[in-house]
Image: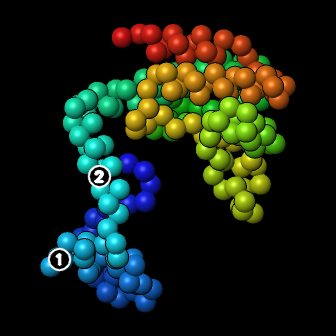
Amino acid sequence: TPPGMSFVFFNDRADAARGAANCVTHYWDWRPRMKPELYYQFWDGTAPTHHIYGLREALDMIGEEGLDHVWARHEKLAKGVWAACDAWALNGPLHMNITDPAKRSHAVTSIGIGAPHGTNLRNWLSEQAGVTLGIGLGMNTDEDSNSDGYFRIGHMGHVNTHMMMGTLGAIDAGLKALNIPHGKGALEDASGVYSKP
């Protein structure tokens, strides 16, 4: 489902805290939506119809694929990305943000490559290949001046092997175009992961 809609789960303790909060606005207040009398009252204004239909289709797709298969697909896609990153890391500044594979997310991979390579690579991919990589978290803030040395690859949701191979191939091309040192064989290693049943 595209971004723009969320669910709020809360308990009595959270509701009591909300009652004492001095910062509740109409937009963020869940109380009017707790027990609506009319359909439109589920939202603070116009219902996000396109999101509701998108969510319905996404849930149907998950049901058709089977949740266990969804988790397995995300894991396999992640491991292919990690294999490519391991190959690139053999010769150059690229490194996994989370070194322990057991602690990595199967939803998104954060990769360090050093400033300004992260920003330069993201810009090149966007302008030359039509691929958007996630920014380094904390960018445009004073908290983390090195955040432009990172990028993120998402590999969850409606994503499959050929999408990931396309993304990894575009990254490989960007590394070459920008003369960023990197190890070879990333696509071979990723396809090796993806070719296993």
Q: Residue at x 66, y 56 (%)?
A: 138
Q: Amino acid at mark 1?
A: Leu
Distance in Å between CA atoms under marks 2 and 1: 19 Å
Residue 185: x and y in percent read 66, 11
Q: Nearer the viewer, residue 176 or 57?
A: 57
Q: Position of residue 127 (x, y in %)?
A: 73, 39
Write down the residue under mark 1. Answer: 38
Question: In this rendering, does residue 177 appear at all?
Answer: yes
Q: Quick check: 48 above or below 157?
A: below
Q: Vertically, is 147 above or below 93?
A: below
Indicate the quadrant where residue 76 lies. Answer: top left
Q: Say left or right for 44 vs 93.
A: left
**Helix, strand or loop at disc 1?**
loop
- List x then y, in percent, for residue 16: 28, 82
Q: Quadrant of the C terminus?
A: top left
Q: How many marks?
A: 2
Q: Earlier in the sequence, mark 2 or mark 1?
A: 1
Q: Nearer the viewer, residue 100 or 118?
A: 118
The amino acid beneath tag 2 is Tyr
Q: Residue at x 61, y 44 (%)?
A: 134
Are there few (<14), some (14-19), or many (20+) residues within 10 Å of tag 1? few
Q: Residue 58: x, y in percent?
A: 30, 43
Residue under numbered circle 2: 53
Q: Secondary structure at mark 2?
A: helix
